[in-house]
Image: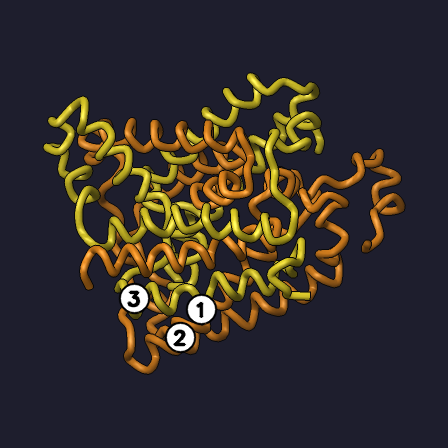
Amino acid sequence: MYAPAAKAWSPYAAGVVIGLLQIPAFLLIDTALGASSSYVTVSGHLAAIADPGIKAIKYVARHLEGAKNWWQVAVVVGIALGALLSSRLSGTARSAPSPVWQRAIGRHSPPTRFAMAFAGGFLMLLGARIADGCTSGHGISGSAQLAIGSFIAVAAMFGGAMLAAQFLRRV
Amino acid sequence: MTTLSAILVGLAMGAVFGFALEKSRVFEPGVIVGQMQLRSFIMLKVFLTAVATGLVVLAALHGFGFAKLFPKATIFGADIVGGLVLGAGITLAGACPGTVLAQIGAGYRDAWFTLIGGLAGALTFSYLEPALNPILLSGGPGRLTLNGVFGVPFWPLALGFAALLVAGLVALERWRPWRSEVGENYDGLLPPAQPAALAGAGRRQPA
C-alpha cells in the first residue's frame, strides 16, 4: 500500500514523513523546514544581473549567500525532483492544467489559467514575505514550535484562501 | 556545515518532501481548491499530521537538549495582512510556495507561471521591504510562544497539543475517509457538487 509505485498514500503517512523532516532540519542545518525565503534568494540573484544595486538592500543581502539560504533553494529543487520521481513511478505524470480549473472558472482556457497562475504565485510570495513565512515555515514549522505569530498567520492564510475560493465556481 | 554539504542535504530532504507531497495528492490544484471550498479535506489531513509529527519530534529534540527552537517573531499586522494575501494567492495558484515545485515535477505546465509569478512577488517585496519595514514589518511582542505565555516547558505542551491534533484527525477521518477524496484520476476532482439538499446523499463512496 505504501509502495513507491502506489498512486496515492494515505495523507497521514505522507504527513508523518514531512513532519520527520524536522529532524535533519534542526540537527544538521540548525533551522526549521521552510520554502518561501528561497524565492528571495533566487529572484535576488537573478535581479542582481540587471540591477547590482539590489544587493544594497539589507533584506536581500542577508538572503543571497550562506549555507542556510542555499539549503532552502536545494530543498525546493529537491521537491520537484521527488515529485517527478514519484509521478513517473506511479504513472500519475501530468501535462495540461488540472481539469479543476475548467470547473473553477467555467471554461477551458489555458491563457486565462496561465495569467491566473502568475497572479496567484505573485500574491502567494508577496504575502509569504510580508508574513515572514508560508504554509511550510509558519504552517508546518511555526505551529510545531507553538509560535503565536504562526498560529495567527495560518488562520489568516486559510481565511484569505477560503474567501478567495468563494469567487471561484464550486469545484 | 559547508554550503555544498548543506545543498546536498537540502536536495535529499527536498526529494523526500516532494515524494510525500506527490503521493499524498496534496500538491494537486483540485485538492487545494477543494479544501478551500470545504469540498475535500486531504490538505488539512496532511498539514495537521505534519504539525503533530513535528510537535512530537521537537518535544523530544528540545526536551532532551539536542536542538534549540526558532519560533518566528509575532508581528500582528504582518502576520494577518501577509497571511490573507498569501491565502488568496494559494487559491488562485492552486498551490503553496513549496507545492508549486511538486506540480512542476509532476508536469503541470501552468505551475511554471505560478513559479515565475512567485519569483516576481518575492522580488517586488524585496524592493518594497525598506519602505514596508517601519510601517508593517516591525514592532510587536517578539518571539511569543504558547508555552512562553503559559509559563510552562515546551515539551509537555507540545505533546498535549499533538494529542489534541491526533484526536481531531481521527474524527476527521471518520467523517470523511481519505480514499473517498482522492478522486478517480487521483487529482482530487470529485463528482460535481450536488444541490445542497442532496449533498449528504450524493457523497461518493470509497473506491
Mark 2 vs mark 3, CA separation in Å: 10 Å
Q: Residues within 10 Å of mark 1 (few under 14, many from 20)?
A: many
Relative depth, front residue between B84 and B152: B84
Amino acid, disc 1: Leu
Query: For this view, does A71 lie left or right of residue A125?
Result: left
User: What colour has chain B?
Assistant: orange
Per the image, label 2 sits on a secondary structure element best described as: helix
Q: Which mark is residue B55?
A: 1
- Density class for disc 3 (Cα within 10 Å; few <14, some 14-19, many ≥20) is some
Residue at 72% across / 50% down in the picture? B181
Identify which residue is drawn at 10% across, 32% down: A56
Q: Residues within 10 Å of mark 2 (few under 14, many from 20)?
A: many
Q: Quadrant of residue B45?
A: bottom right
* Mark 2 belongs to chain: B
> Which kind of residue does numbered mark 3 sit on?
Leu
- On the image, the x and y values in percent for residue B98 come to 44, 45
Left or right: A142 in relation to A102: left
Closer to the chain start, of discs 3 and 1, is: 1
- Say whether marks 2 and 1 touch (CB < 8 Å): yes
Residue in the image at 53% along x and 66% along y: A16
Q: State whether residue A156 appears in this view.
A: no
Q: CA distance from mark 3 to mark 1?
A: 11 Å
Residue A55, percent from left and from top: 13, 33
Q: Chain of mark 1?
A: B
> Which quarter of the image is occupied by the N terminus of chain B?
bottom left
Q: Which residue is mark 3?
A: B69
Q: Which residue is mark 2?
A: B59
B171 in relation to A48, above or below? below
Point out residue A4 in the picture as x, y percentages from the top left corner.
Answer: 60, 61
Colour of chain A in the rendered structure image: yellow
State which tag comes first along the sequence, 2 or 3.
2
